[in-house]
Amino acid sequence: MSEIQQVHEYTGEVAPGGPVHVRELPALTIRKMAVSDMHNNVYLLTCRATGEQLLIDAADDAERCLALVRLGGERLGHLVTTHQHWDHHRALPEVARVTGAETYAGADDAVALPVAPDHTLVQGDVIRCGDIELEVSHLRGHTPGSVALAYRDPEGSTHLFTGDSLFPGGVGNTKNEGQSFDSLYRDVLERVFAVYDDDTWFYPGHGADSTIGAERPHLDEWRERGW
């Protein structure tokens, strides 16, 4: 399997085939890379005390996903899929098979995945990865079972992984059949912006990161335009 480079000057601006960006927190290491022509983001979280690891969205290119795991260590204990859309789980079967990691997904998206999750997630659940705890928010609208994961750093700001439910500039796509802007906007408002401080850094399923504070002034604009 090929190896991949990593850089420690974290900007969150990653590209398919490019280096992994690494962010070191006191208790957690976050690694971000992009895969596929859809620029899907894949995140590896490593508990610094125990070495236990959690991967968010094995979106594509199983070989690169497994190489990412090796950057943090050999053990992958947890494999979370943020939502059911095909571009976020193309490598899930292979990564789950090779690593033997426990799999997780939102309860209302579970039946649509190529691997039945070992654990189905609902609002208020907590995933433990070594000494790290991740809070689960169920954000309905982009898909019925989309989830976001939040790490509240006791020595700093919160770090929130939002899948395709929240991006810089707006909520995720809700233009297709079965999607709902009203539902997603309400959940993002009540379960993200009403819960997390402005210094919360969030990491979406595609593209660059942002903060809650940078996006909060635009909430009324999103509501008025309906996307």
Image: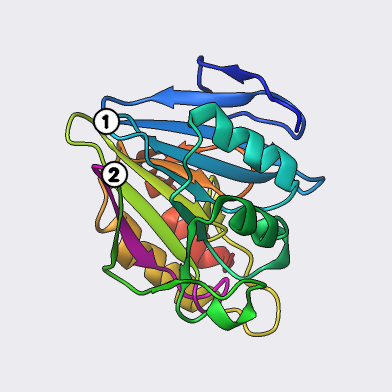
Locate residue 83: give its quadrant. bottom right
The spot of residue 225 in percent (x, y) is 58, 64
**Is 169 left, or right, of 3 in this rendering?**
left
Crowding near pointer 2: few (<14 within 10 Å), some, many (20+)? some
| Magenta highlight on residue 139 | yes
Q: Is residue 97 above or below residue 46?
A: below
**Is 94 left, or right, of 156 in this rendering?**
right
The residue shown at (46%, 77%) is 183
> Foreground residue, 182 or 128?
128
Q: Amino acid at mark 2?
A: Gly
The spot of residue 115 in percent (x, y) is 62, 71
Residue numbers of the magenta segment: 130-145
Instruction: Give the labeled residue for mark 1.
Output: 49
- Give the spatial CA distance, label 2 vs label 1: 7 Å
Locate residue 143: give its quadrant. bottom right
Q: Amino acid at mark 1?
A: Ala
The spot of residue 221 in percent (x, y) is 49, 57
Give the structural element (helix, strand or loop) at label 1: loop
Q: Earlier in the sequence, mark 2 or mark 1?
A: 1
Q: Is residue 21 above or below residue 104?
A: above
Single out the residue that lies furthest toward the right: 37
> Foreground residue, 187 or 8?
8
| Magenta highlight on residue 120 | no
The spot of residue 129 in percent (x, y) is 33, 48
Circles 2 and 1: CB distance less than 8 Å?
yes
The residue shown at (77%, 30%) is 17
Instruction: Give the labeled residue for mark 2.
Output: 130
- Quadrant location of the C terminus? bottom right
